[in-house]
Structures are given as structure tokens and as C-alpha cells.
Amino acid sequence: MEGKKDPRERLIDELHNFQEIAAFLNPSPGEIPRLDCVDIAGFSMPLADVIGGDHIIYVDFGRRYNLERRIAEATEKGRTAVAEKLKQLTQRAGILVADVSGHRMTDALIAAMLHQAFLLGAQYELDRDGEITTRIFEHINTRFYRTTATNKYFTMIYGEINTEGRFRFISAGHQPPAVFSREFGKFMKISKDRLISFPPVGLLPSGNDPDVRSEPGLIGYKKRYRVNEINLLSVGDILLLFTDGLAEHAEGQFFPAEVERLLADCADCSAEQISAQIRSALLARAAPKDDTSVVVIRRTK
């Protein structure tokens, strides 16, 4: 019958359509935050095709949101505390890195769900509190716990860097951030009490969920998210956010040792140059076995 596609052609067409939609959510170079004294760049490299289970969201508060209007409205309504918090966002940028279990093209659906849930929630948070709080991640965890299969959880780290090099973040089962000291030419050890992490998103119900109707049995509850803080103390210090694809590349032989040497050799490189060199070195070292994402945050002043 004319116009009727073969089932295989229809499936291929649907996959291409899904691929286009999911790829649209990948950050463009123009979305990378611009912040005084801090240089940011990164990449996300799917294992197969053009999309996978890794995802990066950049939040340049000044460009993504009309802060001036929000500050004026909050001030007009006498919400001075909210107005002050909104003003502070002009000196901060947000970065979210997520890693969905699995690295097939269709795992990008979970990342797409996170993308929309986070950005919608962030808008409400700014209107209500003047900042992004842990509340949004409690809601996201609850939503994914209730609506996704138990084997489709994801790890996530969300943090905000300010112009003074302070990085405040929460981690849900994600790889801890790494700090490279330009002065000492190596990764610095970070105290465990600054790297508190929680179960992956969607794996356990939130203990503070008011709509919990039954005990979860042996698996227990997830405790409330807690904010960690680390600092880039000196000019040239680098903060790396990354997924398992970097941490486990080449059977763990690439990171941290080879990346540490690369960063030592790139003391005066920009974040974009460092990001490109990490990507090139990773591909030269061995064929990837997982989706890989890296964000480079470098203090410049």
C-alpha cells in the first residue's frame, strides 16, 4: 500500500526523531556560564551515536533569567530577603552533571526528564526563595522514585561556583569533584566531611516526603540532602566535575594520574583548552567503554 512504511523503517524514523529531540537538550557553547574570575568549559561524549545517559546543564543565572525584573518585583512586594538572594546570583553560576545507569540511546529519556524537571523547578525556586535550594532535589528524587524502574536510577551532582572560587554542591551517588592545585601541581586531598554523598536519584524514597503512605521496608529512606563546600583558593586552581566514563577509563589508569600530569602541563591554558586536551588524551589512551562527561572550572583571578 502506497505511503505505508515498513515496520523497520518506521522504527528507524522514530529513533531518529527521538535522537533529534534528546540532542536538542544538550548544552550549546553559548550556554556555558560567563563569570568574573572563573572560566568554565566542558564536554559530554556519548559512547554510542550522539546521545546517551550522561547530561550536563549549565545555569548562567544572569542570562537564563531576568534577574533585574525579579529583584524589582521582590523589592516592590517587600520581599527584601528574596531580593538580596537574587542579587547574589549575579556572582554565581550553576552546573549539574548527571549519569543515568546504562549508556544506550534510550537512556537519554531519563536525562531529558531530569532536564525539564530541574529547569522548571529552578524557576519556581527563584520566584519563591530567590535561589535554588535542596528542596528541588528532594522533589526530583521523589518524582523519579515513583515513576521510574528501580534499575533506571541516576547519579547527579549539582553545584554553584561563585566569583571568589567557592563551590557549594550536593551529590547523589556521583563521582566526587576533584581539585587540582596549580601551586603544588597535583590533585589535592579533600576531607570526607566536605564530600558527603547520598544515594543515586530515584533509588530510595525521601524521608521527608509528606505523601509517603507506607514504610519502605528494608531499603529505608534517603536522608535530607546536605550541602558541601570546597574552595579554589589560588589563581590557576582547577575543579573537575565528571562521570564514571572518566574515572574508570582505561581500567582506571587514565584518571587521576594521567589527567594530573596533563593539568600540570596546562597551567596557563583556558578551561576550553584543558577540556579539549582531556578529551583528546582520553580518546588517544583507549577506546571509551562508557558515556563520558567532564566540566572544567578554573579560577583566573
Image: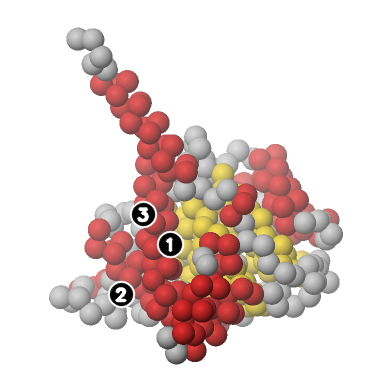
Position of residue 10 relative to residue 15, above or below, is above
Residue at x 35% of width, y 26% of height? 12
Position of residue 102 relative to residue 147, above or below, is above
Q: Which amino acid does label 3 sit on?
A: Met
Residue 261: percent from the left, percent from the top? Answer: 78, 56
> Which part of the image, by quadrant, shows the N terminus?
top left
Residue at x 62% of width, y 49% of height? 29
Q: Quick one: SS at disc 3?
A: helix
The residue pinned by badge 3 equals 113
> Which part of the image, by quadrant, shows the C terminus?
bottom right
- Within 10 Å of disc 1 (Cα), the crowding (few <14, some 14-19, many 20+) is some
Precedes in sequence: disc 2 or disc 3: 3
Residue 42: percent from the left, percent from the top? Answer: 63, 53
Q: How far apart are marks 2 and 1 (CA)?
A: 20 Å
Residue 31: percent from the left, percent from the top? Answer: 58, 55
The residue pinned by badge 1 equals 119
Precedes in sequence: disc 2 or disc 1: 1
Q: Distance between the residues labelled 3 and 1?
A: 10 Å
| Discs 2/3, front | 3
Q: Quick one: SS at disc 1?
A: helix
Q: What residue type is labelled 1?
A: Leu
- Within 10 Å of disc 2 (Cα), the crowding (few <14, some 14-19, many 20+) is many
The residue pinned by badge 2 equals 206
